[in-house]
Every structure is written in C-alpha cells, then in structure tokens.
Image: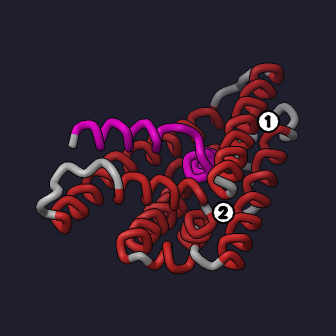
Amino acid sequence: MLTFAAAFFLAIITPGPGVLSTAGVGAAYGFRAGFRYVTGLFIGTNLVGLAVVTGLAAVLLASPVIRTVLFTASTAYLLYLAARIAFAGTRVGFIEARRQPGIGDGLILQALNPKAYVVNTVFITGFAFLPGALTTEIVLKFIIMNAIWIPIHLLWLWAGGAIKRLDLPPPVQRRINFVMAGAMLAVVALAAASAFA
C-alpha cells in the first residue's frame, strides 16, 4: 500500500495538464476563484477513475474513431497550452485565461486529459495489495488517490497565486514560461508515445 501511495504521489506531483492549468488559474484569479476549477478537476478525475473501474473507458477507447478523436483533441489542447505558455512574453504565463474557469472547465479538461486515463488505469489495475478483496482494494485506492490528489492540486493552485504576487524580473519570468511549456510538450510526447505503443 505504501508503494502504491508513493508511486501515485510521484505520478501526480509532476506537471501535467491538470496541475499546470490549476497553477494557471491560481496565477490569473487567485486561490478562491480557482477553487471551483479544481473542484471540476476533482470530479472529473474521479469520473475517469470510475470509467476505468467499470470498464467504460476500455469499451469507449476500444473504438479507433473515439480514440483518435480523443487523442487529437487532447494533443491539440496540450499544444495550444504549451504555445500560450512559451509565448507569454515577460508574464508568468502558466495559462492566460480570458474568463474565470469553473467546474465545467475542469470536467472537460479531465475528459480530454490523457494523463488522467493513463494514471487511473495504471494505479487502479496495477499495484495490487489486497488480491483477495478486490472491492476493498479499489475503495482504498480511491481514498488514497484522493488524499494525495487534493493537497497537491491545492498546492499548485496556491503556487500559481503566489507567483502572481511576485514581482519577478522579465528574464526569470521568461525562463519559467519556457520550463512550463517544455513540461507541457513532454506531456504531449508521452501521450503520443502511449497512443502509438
């Protein structure tokens, strides 16, 4: 169980669409306003987890057409985010949001987020620690994953808000933008690798 928790922590803390967009909402609107967006991400990630547990994700993703549409939409969205981050000029541009994102935006992101499907599939189907009690194991996995997911996303939301309040020199802001854009491109590369594996 500890191995499961440690591996899940490492998978979630790394920059992906969810945490990067969470930091972006924090940078644009602050912690309180971004909390609704994180609520949408939270509901979305648990719905993706339920889709994995019930087999719905496997059935839907078994269709080459649906898989291609999802892959294309998620890749386009991730490339768009990476471009927005990289070319944000001297602003710290995790994501420049023009309107305040809400619960629906978080749900949509998780529905398109390939990392959400990969992480949920790997951790729900792997890392068996109660092989004789599958239902109990799945319930415990959801509890552990949420106990890790919630504080990490709230921390990223806080970090985005904190960076907004800093008066960083332009070269430092540009470096942050390029690092965050590089992280998004790495997510795109991993999504492409998993799609063609």
Q: Which of 8 and 164 is in front in this view?
A: 8
Magenta-colored span:
2-26
- Quarter holding the N terminus is top left
Separation of disc 1 and disc 2 at Cα?
18 Å
Q: Which of 134 and 18 is in front in this view?
A: 134
Q: Going by the picture, which residue comes out furthest to the left?
A: 132
- Magenta segment: does it hold 14? yes
**Residue of label 1:** 91
Q: What residue type is labelled 1?
A: Arg
Q: Residue 190 carries which label?
A: none
Q: What residue type is labelled 2?
A: Gln
Residue 197 picture location, percent across and down: 64, 53
Q: Which of 107 and 59 is in front in this view?
A: 59
Q: Please name the predominant secondary structure of the magenta segment in the image.
A: helix
Q: Is residue 46 above or below residue 30?
A: below
Q: Residue at x 82, y 38 (%)?
A: 86
Q: Which residue is drawn at 84% across and 46% down?
A: 83
**Residue of label 2:** 100
Residue 77 picture location, percent across and down: 75, 59
Residue 110 in view of the camera:
yes
Q: Residue at x 50, y 58 (%)?
A: 38
Decide which of tag 1 and tag 2 comes sooner along the chain.
1
97 to the left or right of 60 = right
Residue 103 picture location, percent across and down: 53, 70
76 to the left or right of 192 = right
Residue 29 in view of the camera:
no
8 to the left or right of 179 = left
